[in-house]
Image (tube, rainbow, N blue to C red):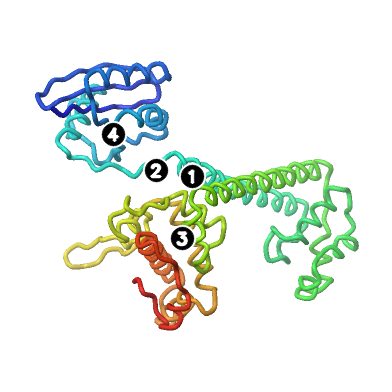
Amino acid sequence: MKTVSGLDVHKDSIFMCILDEQSKIIEEKFGVTTREINRLREVMKSHYVTEVCMESTGIYWMPIWRLLEDDFHLRLVNPQFLKQLPGRKSDVKDAQWIATVLLKELVRDSFVPDGNIQSLRQYGRRINEINKDLVRSEQRIDMILQRCNIRLSNCVSRTKNKSYRKVVDALIAGETSADVLVNLIHGRTVNRHGRSAVHDALEGFIKHSDRDLLKQYTQMLDAFEVQKQECIDSMVQMCQELYPKAFSFLLSFPGIKFISAAIIISEIGDNMKLFATAAALVSWAGLRPRNDESAGKIKSRKITHGNKYLRKAMMECAWGAARTKGSVFYSRFWHLRGMKKHHNAVIVAIARQLLTIIWTLLTKQENFDPEYNLKNNTCSYN
């Protein structure tokens, strides 16, 4: 006789409902401490529960999953697929409803990676956070310089270059003479805008408080760079030790480097059996055009929502592949551009094609052969 359990997880409580095929119901409330979760496990084991279902509510499900995954077949479900009809609602009824739909096989569980992939994801998500912090710190530094009427950002291509940093370090050290600061700018920048224009952009009025803030933000930048490199090194080392075949395989693709390969593995792993088809993986990544049609008119063809971290990595890889001369993706980029397609739409198409090839070759355990694709001027997998 099949016995299942539904868990309604909250920040400070867990509502459990055990249900079997004879409609016997056992309900109880538990806390969220490790002792309480262990007690929850013993209660479910004493009633011979085999499957457990819970909603993916924030991060509250994660510690419960870690403590229960060795003893039960767990299912994590999107709350959108478990909504009840409007009416009387309580936490106990929510747990009972989750158990009911699980018993009747009406749920579709979400993809939950194993422990190693989850560890890789932590590093990858941290790198994404650090990139945002780096951009924010760079913007703050430029705001301070603008306040001091130092218009260096009008002359350089980006604020994250050596010339810009040299000027900031000199200002922190107390140098204010534009004649000295202009010598720190790269010669190409000076020749492009003219020495007098760059000299005028470096003339400003800087206070002691401005130097202090510049020093703090540059220290934050350096600290973020160190943390980012540590995360990258840890990801690459884990991929080389745990997933060497898939890691080396991804590095053979044009446009995919160490950090991109590590992020792709951290999001999808190396087992493509988790995704039934390449289209399922593309849809899960959010790179598939949405199906929005009414009365025979197409309302939208924008890409769908999905795994934003994987989608971002694939878009960056698509840009790199599109700029790799001689690759099939380079030819496809300019072919679509010749058809008057917008460059953003072309990059999405290349990212979708790249992810499809990754799924196909990982499934077949084959290596990417750029010479074969280049020889035929087309891609074997569309």
Q: Label 3, on which residue? A: 314
Tell me which numbered mark, 1 or 2, is placed earlier along the sequence.
2
Kind of element beneath mark 1: helix
Asked if marks 1 and 2 touch (Cβ < 8 Å), the reply is yes
What residue is drawn where x is 72% and y is 44%? 217
Could you give the CA–CA distance between mark 4 and mark 3, rounded to whole angstroms? 32 Å
The amino acid marked with disc number 3 is Met
Circles 4 and 3, Cβ within 8 Å, touching? The answer is no
Task: Rate crowding at label 3 as few (under 14), some (14 to 19) or many (20 or more) other CA atoms within 10 Å.
Answer: many
N-term-proximal mark, 3 vs 1: 1
Q: Earlier in the sequence, mark 3 or mark 2?
A: 2
Label 4 belongs to which residue? 73
Q: Tell me the CA gap for discs 1 and 2.
A: 9 Å
Relative placement, left or right, of 234 versus 93 is: right
* 228 on left or right of 38: right
Extreme left residue here? 22
As displayed, is residue 7 above or below residue 81? above
Q: Residues within 10 Å of mark 2 (few under 14, many from 20)?
A: some
Judging by the rendered image, the residue that carries numbered circle 2 is: 113
